[in-house]
Amino acid sequence: MINFGTNDYGYAFSQNHNIEEIKKNGLVSDVVEAIKQALKKIINHGARKVLVFGVALDGCRPISVTMQSANKSATYDRFGCVKDNNDFCNYHNVLLQEGLKELREQNPDVQIVYGDLYNAMQSILDDSQSLGE
């Protein structure tokens, strides 16, 4: 199981870089490339089944909501989560899935599974009333 990115992005946000700056400076591409390189190493060492998690809804974490509370332009979804942060996480996940597709094509004998934390968490929020809030 592999999960990368959250700390890298959290640090960038804590340094007051906005989402567009982070996208432009290539941090997401760098993180996805680091994930791919780590996967290549473990595959070369014999791994044949790998689970790689995407980034969850970061905009729903209390620290994200708190950090954005002073930002007058921040927008929130119906659950009170920071939309820009969640959109950014989705952007990371799209690039990650593209990278995993590439690795699957290069390593057809390896089972590379994407763990979709983003949509799993979104599903829980969407169904919160039926789940007992």
Image (cartoon, helix red, strand yellow):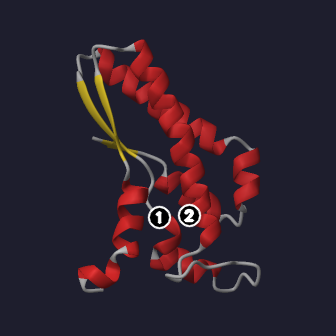
Tell me the tag on residue 57.
Answer: 1
Percent from the top left, x then y, of residue 110?
28, 19
Quarter of the image containing the N terminus?
Answer: top left
Foreground pick, 82 / 28: 82
Please indicate whether residue 56 sits to the left or right of residue 68 in the image: left
User: Regarding mark 2 in the picture, which secondary structure is present there?
Assistant: helix
| Residue at 56% from the left image edge and 39% from the top image edge | 95
- Inspect this view and state whether residue 14 appears: no
How many residues crowd mark 1 within 10 Å: few (<14), some (14–19), many (20+)? many
Against 87, residue 39 (above or below) is above
Q: Residue at x 46, y 74 (%)?
A: 61
Is the Cβ of the residue at disc 1 closer than 8 Å to that at disc 2?
A: yes
User: At x 67% / y 64%, what residue is drawn?
Assistant: 15
- Can you say which quadrant of the picture contains the C terminus? bottom left
On the image, the x and y values in percent for residue 128 come to 33, 80
**Picture coordinates of residue 6, whole percent (x, y):** 47, 55
Does 12 appear above or below 133? Answer: above
92 or 6, which is in the foreground? 92
Q: Earlier in the sequence, mark 1 or mark 2?
A: 1
Where residue 115 appears, as percent x and y from the top left, is 34, 46
Q: Marks 1/2: CA distance? A: 5 Å
